Image: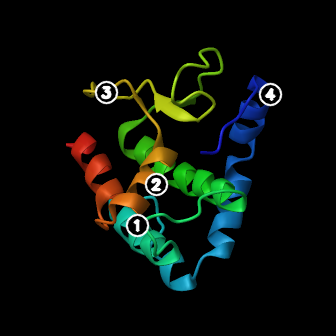
Amino acid sequence: MFRLETQKQFDEWLNDEDLRLMRFFASIPPELLIYLDFSLDSLKHLETWLLQKYPEVQADLSGNELAAIDTIGTYVGEVFRKHLGGQWVIDLENEENAYFGIPGIADFDRNLPIKLVYPSTWVTTSIHRRTGTFIYNLVEKFSR
């Protein structure tokens, strides 16, 4: 999993969000790009593409793929934030935390049954579960 190690790295990650997303949008097929409008339905199209991009359950998610998964997680996180609010946060204190160094979202606009989400982990889980609607179902469930 893509992890940041310092507050400076996290601050840079936050500041570079638009650039990361622009690079992502430039790298994907035009037939997918037309659907990536930060709507809930865009998550279905994104996940269909993910399953085509990573056809094996045990896809190699190392090296450059970790940065790609992080960027896809950024898009998923921004869809979540658009519909439920929240702020990007990171735990850089508790090294025992399984999500140490992974950007998450907290402080939602609504009272949700959870306090913190990690969109990039949803991306890898969707690749492994291969339902085609894992990410959409999560965000849609919280949006109700």
Of mark 4 and mark 2, the one earlier in the sequence is 4
Answer with left or right where residue 109 lies relative to residue 141: right
Residue 57 is situated, as x and y percent measured from the top left of the image, at 42, 66
User: Which residue type carries mark 1?
Assistant: Glu
Residue position marked by numbered label 4 in the rendering:
8
- Whether 12 is drawn above or below 23: the answer is above
Location of residue 73 in the rendering, given as x and y in whole percent from the top left corner? 53, 51
Q: CA distance from mark 3 to mark 1?
A: 23 Å
- Ranked by sequence position, the earlier of labels 4 and 3 is 4
Relative to 37, say whether 109 is above or below.
above
Residue 133: percent from left, percent from top: 29, 63
Residue 110 appears in the picture as rendered: yes
- CA gap, disc 4 and disc 3: 27 Å
From the image, tell me which residue sits under label 3. Answer: 114
Q: Quadrant of residue 4?
A: top right
Asked which quadrant contains residue 11, the reply is top right
Residue that appears at 59% across and 35% down? 102
Give the residue type that dot 3 points to: Ile
Q: Which residue is mark 1?
A: 47
Question: Between marks 4 and 1, how big is the CA–CA gap?
Answer: 31 Å
Cβ atoms at labels 2 and 3 below 8 Å apart: no
How is this picture coloured? rainbow
Q: Amino acid at mark 2?
A: Val
The disc, 2 or 3, on the residue closer to the chain's N-terminal end is 3
